[in-house]
Amino acid sequence: MTNGPDSPAAPVILAAMEATWPPARRIATGPWILREGLGGGQRVSAATAEGDWAEADIPQAEAGMAALRQERLFLIRQGEERLDAALAARGYLVKDPVVVCAAPVEVVAQPVSAMAAFPHWPPLAIAVDLWAEGGIGPDRLAVMERVGGLKAAILGRKDDSPAGSAFAAMSGPVAMLHALEVRPAMRRRGAARDMVRAAAGWAREQGAEQFAVVVTEANAPARALYRDLGMAETALYHYRVAP
């Protein structure tokens, strides 16, 4: 796979993103896929266009999301400018532009001491506590449990103290990193770097070829970290939410 916003890697990585952070349900409604998130986050609660659609079809998606008791939220991928414009005309607002960063797993998987970060599953209680401190509670842990393939929690340590936790999972040749949380007192001390490298090392052992992560466009420190680790920005997407 080659990297870059228009590369063939982008669709594969976007598919892996859903497989490794799955909704509770996917519901086909006309040209739309609706997702029931059950509190698992925006990606697992957003509607996407998966077929030919017309502006007259948008209320069908809106009604389906209302039936799920979810906000009217659409995920807009590159190349979907017509849908983006149609939703903007209906008053939908842009929310959380996202960057997908990826690299060959060998680039990211540099050696890390097991004292600094290590993979395990099921997650240790301290990993669950660290996620909870960062706002990742039972609903998002339930997303991790739904993943049917290979997966791991990553526990990071710094100065003999728990520093953070993350979740990694496999989908075909792609490993995705999710739910990376570092304690505020441990930030800017290399804990996140060690955890990402440990996750990539685990992924390489599982046979992964690519390693990827999604990050909001506004999160400049995280984007800088992933660039420093050799990851390129391979795809972009954003949400449109009803006002």
Image (cartoon, rainbow, N blue to C red):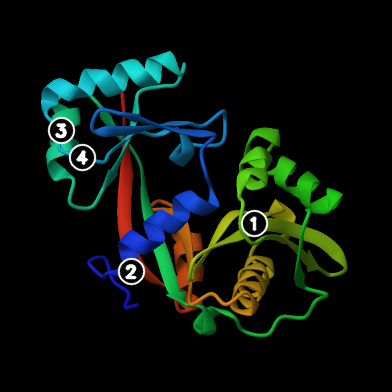
Residue plotted at (35% across, 19% down): 64
Looking at this view, name the residue that lies furthest to the right.
Answer: 160
In the picture, measured across the screen, residue 155 lies left or right of residue 188, that is right
In terms of image quadrants, where is residue 100?
A: bottom left
**Upstream in sequence: badge 1 or badge 3:** 3
Q: Which residue is mark 1?
A: 167
| Label 4 – label 1 distance at C-alpha | 32 Å
Q: Is residue 178 above or below residue 95?
A: below
In terms of image quadrants, where is residue 113?
A: bottom right
The amino acid marked with disc number 3 is Trp
The amino acid marked with disc number 2 is Ala
Q: Secondary structure at mark 4?
A: loop
**Upstream in sequence: badge 4 or badge 2:** 2
| Label 2 – label 1 distance at C-alpha | 22 Å
Q: Residues within 10 Å of mark 2 (few under 14, many from 20)?
A: some
Q: Is residue 127 above or below residue 154?
A: above
Q: Secondary structure at mark 2?
A: helix
In the picture, measured across the screen, residue 201 lies left or right of residue 172, that is right
| Label 4 – label 3 distance at C-alpha | 6 Å
Q: Which residue is mark 3?
A: 53
Q: Residues within 10 Å of mark 3 (few under 14, many from 20)?
A: few
In the picture, measured across the screen, residue 81 lies left or right of residue 68, that is left
Residue plotted at (72% across, 60% down): 186
Do labels 4 and 1 touch, CB within 8 Å? no
